[in-house]
Amino acid sequence: MSTCQYLERVERWFDGEITASQEIEEHLAGCTECTRRLEDLKALRTAIESTKARVEISDAQFPSFMQRIEDEIEPPRRRHVGLWALASALAAALVVAWSLISIVAPGPEPLQAVTIEEASTEIEGATTESVYVNEETTMVWINLPDGDML
């Protein structure tokens, strides 16, 4: 219950209905009840000013509006996002591992030269021909009956 006779005047002064500033300010300096009421009024005004203006929602917007309210009340369920992220990371790790193995692993055995003294073929009608490129390299050609070479 209010016991200060100035309380209503402080409210009217705060609302700008009266202009007795000096008298009210002097009273506020000594009255804790009116000072507390003035602080409450300031907080109330700040809260009112911070609220957004009312917006009309059309029929087309209503389902989306309700969905947002439902999402705030009960957040949507997670859809195994973590599982797909884990599968993607695993696939990437496998690609990197395979690449590293391919780079680090030794390649096939190097070709060894074979000394050929004689060449022959079992292909009917084909002949062989040896061509000496240099002292260490000999090429063997197989001539097929239709003129192709292997």
Image (spheres, rainbow, N blue to C red):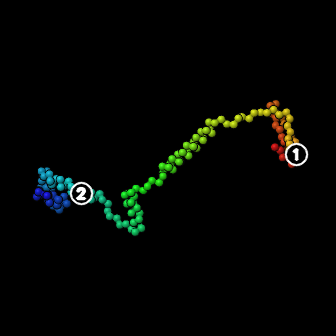
Task: Out of 105 and 138, give the one closest to the viewer.
Answer: 105
Q: Which residue ends up furthest to the right in the rendered image? A: 125
Direction from residue 105 to residue 149 in the image, left or right? right
Q: Is residue 26 above or below residue 56?
A: above
Inspect the image, locate mark 1, and give the three-letter code of the amino acid beneath it: Glu
Q: Is residue 69 above or below residue 94?
A: below
The answer for how far apart the CA atoms under marks 1 and 2 are is: 108 Å
Query: Can you identify the residue that label 1 sits on?
Result: 124
Residue at horizontal 85 percent and vertical 33 percent from the top: 117
Q: Which residue ends up furthest to the bottom in the rendered image? A: 59
Dot 2 surroundings within 10 Å: few (below 14), some, or many (20 or more)?
few
> Residue 115 at what x, y percent from top left?
81, 32
Residue at horizontal 52 percent and vertical 45 percent from the top: 89
Is residue 136 visible in this depiction of the protein?
A: yes
Dot 1 surroundings within 10 Å: few (below 14), some, or many (20 or more)?
few
**Which dot, 1 or 2, sits closer to the camera?**
1
Q: Which element carries disc 1, helix, strand or loop? A: loop
Residue at horizontal 13 percent and vertical 58 percent from the top: 2
Direction from residue 49 to residue 128 in the image, left or right? right
Q: Which element carries disc 2, helix, strand or loop? A: helix
Inspect the image, locate mark 2, and give the three-letter code of the amino acid beneath it: Leu
**Where, by quadrant of the figure, is residue 4 drawn?**
bottom left
> Residue 108 at what x, y percent from top left?
69, 37
Direction from residue 93 to residue 11 in the image, left or right? left
Query: Can you identify the residue that label 2 sits on?
Result: 44
> Residue 7 at what x, y percent from top left?
14, 58
Task: Out of 98 and 146, give the one closest to the viewer.
Answer: 98
> Residue 70 at what x, y percent from top left?
38, 60
Looking at marks 1 and 2 on the same chain, the residue that comes earlier in the sequence is marked by 2
